[in-house]
Each structure stands twice: as structure tokens, then as C-alpha cells.
Amino acid sequence: MSIYFLPETKEFGKLSITKEYYRYDVPRAFVAHSKKLNKDLLVYWADEFEDSDTWYYVDFSNIEQERVENGYIQLRDVFQFKKIFEIKTYFDVDLPAEFKLLTCEEVDHEALPPQGFAVKRLSDNEYTAYNRPLDSFTSNNQYHEIRLSRNSTKKGKKDISWSSVQEIFGSWEAVYRSIVDSLDLKKPSFQPALSGVGSYKMQFKAAHNQEITSKASEIFKTLIESNGSLEELRSFDIDLSTIESLVSNLSTYNLKFEFRTNSGNVLSSIDTADLEDTAQSLNEYNQSRVGSESIPQADEISRIITFVEKRYHGQPFNSNTENLVERQISYYISAARMLGLTKWGGQLTPIGQKLAEAEELKEKATILIDLFERSVCGWAWLKHSNVKSVFELNRESAVPFLLEKSAGLSENTAKRRAVTLRKWLDTFKAYKNTFKIQTKLNSL
Amino acid sequence: MSIDDYSWPKDFPSNVPPNDATDANGIAFRLVKNNPPSDLDFVGHNKEPHKKKSKNLKPADYGTSMFRDISNVEFARNSFKAQRNKKIAEGELVPLHGKISKVNHNNHFEAWLREETGIEDCFTVVK
């Protein structure tokens, strides 16, 4: 005979309470161990009826338990992106418990632990629950986590190199930006927030984190199951070159990539050993396309010049000095890199220095026109239009060019990106005569 | 009537109330459905009217939860959907009502209540 609040079910088998977080008459928030599944479950009292109670059950890993009991996260965060099981237990223990896997729509959010519900470990087997302000938690549902580990097939415990970490986190940022584009989100701030010392896990704080996390886990699930086919991945309307970059970096450094919620719940685990066919398909697909990172989003050419000049003089260029939002600042920095004015590390290249030292605007414009024509995007546009110089490009061809040649931009995104290309073209065309004279002079 | 005239619920095993329990006393807060509170508001889950066939219960599972401080009973109310429409009742316990456990860090304690002591009349809804 089971205890009324701790049912024996076909799915979970016999349960035993390992930790009691909160009690009111009986345990109301607790950890139950299923011997049958060899795992822990978080149990929370969901509702009460005349003859029964209902309880929400979710998987509860050791990492999550640590984070909850150390006060790092609130209890509610554990329920994010989880399968939630509802078990109805009758006070009359002769009646069998009813077990149900809830759909997203069936989850009663009022029945989850309220915002601020925190747990504290008082001793080895004693816990308490209390209410805390939301901003007092180290991490919350605006955070997601990336964790890198060596593939288990690799023997030995070599350290993971910092350069691989940089590259892979950089790849993740590119995937993230591409998802932001596809969802057409406003003000999508994204920043590294918390990093575990001595391990390669990092939490990122992101605006719209829930939407992005949901889409990213769908994308990764599709990637893992892709089996060499890109058909479903293409339907996500994201830049597939960012996925290729992530997969190839993981493969190069032989690392496993885990995408987790802030509570530590693993949403996706990418092991590139299973993705060889897909990596090849991605490479073939992207070869004929212009990646998102090569398409400028910095509307005003003059600000690129300002950035390069400020870099040359060691002056700051940020959201305060330029009166722009962080996202736009990153557009100008990316545009300068895309044109070859700066290196990946941010230092000016020789041509960047030349631009900074050029005294006249028309001289700077000439350099920029030349660089754009040689850039991945500029060159692809010239080829697509079958012309030899930017001055022959038709501004109206920007959208069809991006739709045809970009790696996975949707029509809406392509239209937005085309605005930048058209603005650049208009600016360049104003210097048409200067450019021609300069080119002639250079050829003498 | 003396204390001995008020019996313990028949389902209490021999270790309930536990030996270290002390006589009920002092101010206590509990969530109740009824205003004024009824005797059913003081029924813990493992007592009548429900069947009592559960095994492996701890003495605490036979108790009725109470708090010494109103802020802690408010937390109990806010934390669970089933409690949010309940009222906070305040009362003063006396030894006749039964035995109580030590107060823990949450100002929570278990009260093992004797039957038909009229405890509900000692409590009034305050919030």
C-alpha cells in the first residue's frame, strides 16, 4: 500500500522521498527517487480537490538540485522546457493514482512554484523554502547555458583550449543572431553573463530568451536528426552558414556541445561524430551562398569611417559615444571587419590604416568602394547582376540577390538587409566620378 | 471534563505523538477554508474522514501544520494554488488541544490534535 501523497505508478514505479523542501500537513515540494528509472523527480503540489490532490512531476538532475539548493535559481526555473507529468492521488489509497503527461497547453502555470520561491539547504537533510526578490537569483529564465566537453571517445583528460572555446562561443553567437533575425525580434541583447570557473560552461543573458531557447532547441533537434538532409533545417529560415560554422568548429576541436536552460537542464546535445553527412551537405549548400555575417547591416557608411578613425586614434566607439544601441554598434564593427578594414582581433589592417589616414572624404570613399567590390557580398552581387562595378548595379536588385544567394534569409529579413545594401550603393554612386578618376590615376 | 476525556484519533500509531512533543500552547496560525473555521479545517491529511491505510508514515504526517508567525503562513498560502483562496486563522492553543513539535526555522510546527476539543472555536479568521 502506498502513501497517499507518494503513489506507486506503472511509469515511475515505487518512489521514495529523498529531500523534503516544504511541508504543509504533508510534504508539498520534495524530491522523489524512482528506483525503476534510477532518477530523481521534483514533485510540487499542483492542486487540491474534495477527494484528491494533483502533483506536478519533472525530471530533476543533480546539477539542478545543486543550483536550487544553493539558491542560484528559483524552483520555478526547473520546470522550463520539461515534460511535466501530473499525478492525481486520491486520499483513499485504495483508488489507484492517475498519471498523465501534460501538453504545453494543459500545464497550469498558476500551479507551478510562484516567482521567487527559493529553497535553502540548512544541513545535509534539512531544507527550507522562502520567498526572495527575483533579481536576487544569480541566474533566471533570461539565461541559457552552453557547456563544452571533450567527446567521450577521446581518451585522456586534456584541457580544452581557449581558442576552441572562443571559436565555438563565437559560432553560437552567430547562430543566435540568425535566430533573432528569423524571429524578427527587437532589441535582442545578448551577453555573456556567468561562467563556471575551471569548466567550459557559460551562461548567456538574452532578451527574448524563452523564444530563442525554444527555437534553438528545435533547430538543434532537427540538426541531430538530419541524417545529411537539409530540407527541414532550411525551413527554419536561419543562416545555415552559422550552423555549419558551429558544427565544423566542434568537429575540428572534437568537442561536444550542450545547450541547457539556466537550471542546467540539457535541451540539446550535439556530437559531431554523428553529423558527418550533414556537415558535408551544409558545406556544399553554403559554398554557393553568401553567409549572413558577410551581408552588412550598418546603414551609414560615414559611421564605418568614424569607427576606423576612432580605432586609429585609440578613441572609444560605443553606444554612449555614438548614441546608438549596442546592436547597431556591433553592426558597424562587423561591417569594418567584413570589408577588411579590421582583423578579427579588432586591430586595423594596413588598408584600414590607409582609410584612417586619408585626408579627403572622396579618397576614403574610393577605398571603401574598392573594398566592397572585393568583399564576399559585393563580389557575389556583381556576379549575380553580371556587371563589373558597383556603379552598374541596380539598387532594386538587392532583394532578389539576397533571396537567391544568401544562406537562408527569409523574404522579410532579406528586405531589411537590402535596405543597407541600397544605402551603400547610393553613397558609392555619389562618388562615381571621383572613383573613376582615382582608378585611372592609380593605373598610370 | 479533563484532558484524558479527549481521546487521540484511533489511527494514531503508538509513536504518535512522539515522545519529545510538548503540550500545545501559544499563538498559532493556520489556513482554513471556512469562516468561522470548522473542525474539518484542522484535519490533517492522514486522519478521518479519509481512509488511513498508508504505510511508512512519519509522525509528522499525522500532524496538522501551524505557524507561529503570520508571514510564514502567508508564504504557505501564496506558494500553492490550492491554498490561495484559503483564509488565515489565528488562535491560541492550550494543552487540551493536543501536543506540538518544536518550532522550526520556518516558524512551522506540527500539532497532534485530540478529537472533538472544539479547537475551531479558539481560532478566528484574521486575513
Image (spheres, rainbow, N blue to C red):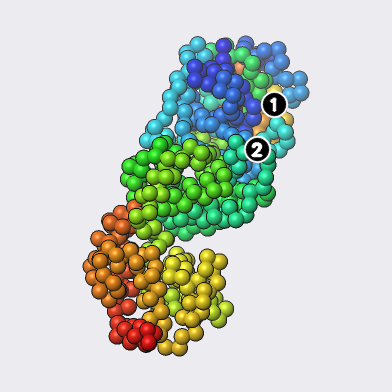
User: The N terminus of chain A lies in which quarter of the figure?
Assistant: top right
For badge 1, the amino acid type reads Ile
Provide residue A364's location: percent of width, then percent of height. Answer: 41, 82
- For residue B70, the mark is none
Is A419 on the left or on the right of A272, as rendered?
left
Provide residue B79's location: percent of width, then percent of height. Answer: 53, 38
Chain of the residue where label 1 is placed in the rendered structure = B
User: The C terminus of chain A lies in which quarter of the figure?
Assistant: bottom left
- For residue B100, the mark is 1
> How would you rate the neighbour count of disc 2 (Cα within 10 Å): few for under 14, some for 14-19, many for 20 or more?
few
Badge 2 and badge 1 both on one subunit: no
Report, in whole angstroms, how far the alpha carbon at label 2 lies from the one at label 1.
59 Å
Q: Nearer the viewer, residue A265 or A439?
A: A439
Chain of the residue where label 2 is placed in the rendered structure = A
Query: In the rendered image of this protein, does residue A37 appear above or below residue A264?
Result: above
Is B32 on the left or on the right of A234, as rendered?
right
Q: Quick one: SS at disc 1?
A: strand
Q: Residue at x 25, y 74 (%)?
A: A392
For badge 2, the amino acid type reads Lys
Instruction: Locate residue A192: give its quadrant.
Output: bottom right
Q: Quick one: SS at disc 2?
A: loop
Q: Residue at x 54, y 18 (%)?
A: A13
Provide residue B91's location: percent of width, then percent of height. Answer: 61, 33
Confirm whether residue A391 shows in the render.
yes
Q: Residue at x 44, y 49 (%)?
A: A243
- For residue A155, the mark is 2
Instruction: Locate residue B42: give its quadrant.
Output: top right
> How would you rate the neighbour count of disc 1 (Cα within 10 Å): few for under 14, some for 14-19, many for 20 or more?
many
